[in-house]
Image (tube, rainbow, N blue to C red):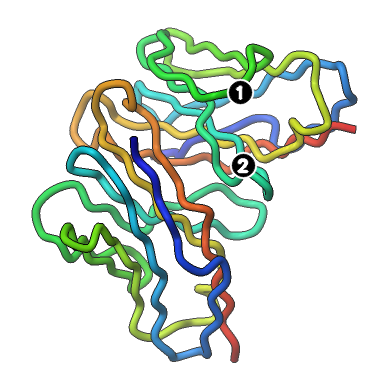
Amino acid sequence: AQSVTQLGSHVSVSEGALVLLRCNYSSSVPPYLFWYVQYPNQGLQLLLKYTTGATLVKGINGFEAEFKKSETSFHLTKPSAHMSDAAEYFCAVSDGRGSTLGRLYFGRGTQLTVWP
Amino acid sequence: KAGVTQTPRYLIKTRGQQVTLSCSPISGHRSVSWYQQTPGQGLQFLFEYFSETQRNKGNFPGRFSGRQFSNSRSEMNVSTLELGDSALYLCASSTFPGGDADTQYFGPGTRLTVL
C-alpha cells in the first residue's frame, strides 16, 4: 500500500528565502509522485509530477522537486519565496495500476507562510 | 480547454437530508475520482469511475454513492447526512487510459455544510 508523510505541517519563510517542503513516501511498486497547491477556498492545482525519466522535475511558478529512490523522498523546493506562494501544499503518490487505479494517496499537507 | 467544473460550489443541508453533487470533467477525460477533504482527516479518496463503472472505492459507508454518465459527467450522492459529512468535496479527472493517465486535475470543489 502507498502512503505519504509530509514533515512539518507549517513552514514559515521570509520573502526571497529558500522554500523546502519535505515529502517521503512508501510504495510497493515504482511510484508516480505529485505536488499540488491549494489556495483558500479553491481546489488543488498541479505544481509538478514525476512519472518516469529525469528525476529532477520542474513545475510551475519556479518550483522543482527531485525524486530520490534510495531515500524514498520527493522534496519540493523553490530558490526564492514570493508572497504569492503562501498556500497549502500536498504531496501525493499513486502507482496507477491494479486496485489503486484512479486513486491518489495524499500527505496531510504543509501550510507555507511567507513573511515580508 | 475548460477545467473540471463542480456544481454547486456551496451547499447547506440539515442532518438526515440527502445531497447530490455534480462534476463535469475536462473534455476528453474519461476517469473521474472523488475526494473528501476535512481538517481532521485530510484528503480521503471516495471512489473512481471510468466508462460508467466504479473501479475503485475508498473506505466510506454506503451512504456515499456515485455514478458516471455516458458523457463522463459524474455525480455523487450522500444520503442521511450527518454533521461529520461537512467537508469540501473535490472531483478530479484524468485522461485514462491515454497518455498522462495518472495525472489528476481537480475542480474547485463543493463546500458542504451540514447543520
User: At 56% from the left edge and 14% from the top edge, which residue is drawn?
Assistant: B66
User: At 33% from the left edge and 84% from the top edge, which residue is drawn?
Assistant: A79
Q: Which residue is mark 2?
A: B37
User: At 54% from the left edge and 56% from the top edge, which residue is drawn?
Assistant: A38
Q: Name the N-terminal-most of marks 1 and 2.
A: 1
Q: Which residue is mark 1?
A: B22
Amino acid at pointer 2: Gln
Which of A69/A62 is in front?
A: A69
Q: Is residue B47 visible?
A: yes
For residue A14, above or below residue A103: below
Q: Secondary structure at mark 1?
A: strand
Q: Chain of mark 1?
A: B
How far across and down, in percent of the image, does residue A35 sit?
Answer: 38, 56
How far across and down, in percent of the image, does residue A12 sit?
Answer: 55, 81
The quarter of the picture where residue A88 lies is bottom right
Amino acid at pointer 1: Ser
User: At 56% from the left edge and 47% from the top edge, which residue is drawn?
Assistant: A43
Left or right of A5 on screen, residue A29: left
Residue B48, numbered label: none
Left or right of A18 on screen, residue A43: right
Q: Secondary structure at mark 2?
A: strand
Left or right of A15 on screen, residue A34: left
Q: Is residue B28 visible?
A: no
Left or right of A114 on screen, residue B3: left
> In which quadrant of the rendered image does the C terminus of chain A lie?
bottom right
- Badge 2: few (under 14), some or many (20 or more) residues near its Cα, within 10 Å? some
CA distance for labels 1 and 2: 16 Å
For residue B71, above or below residue A110: above
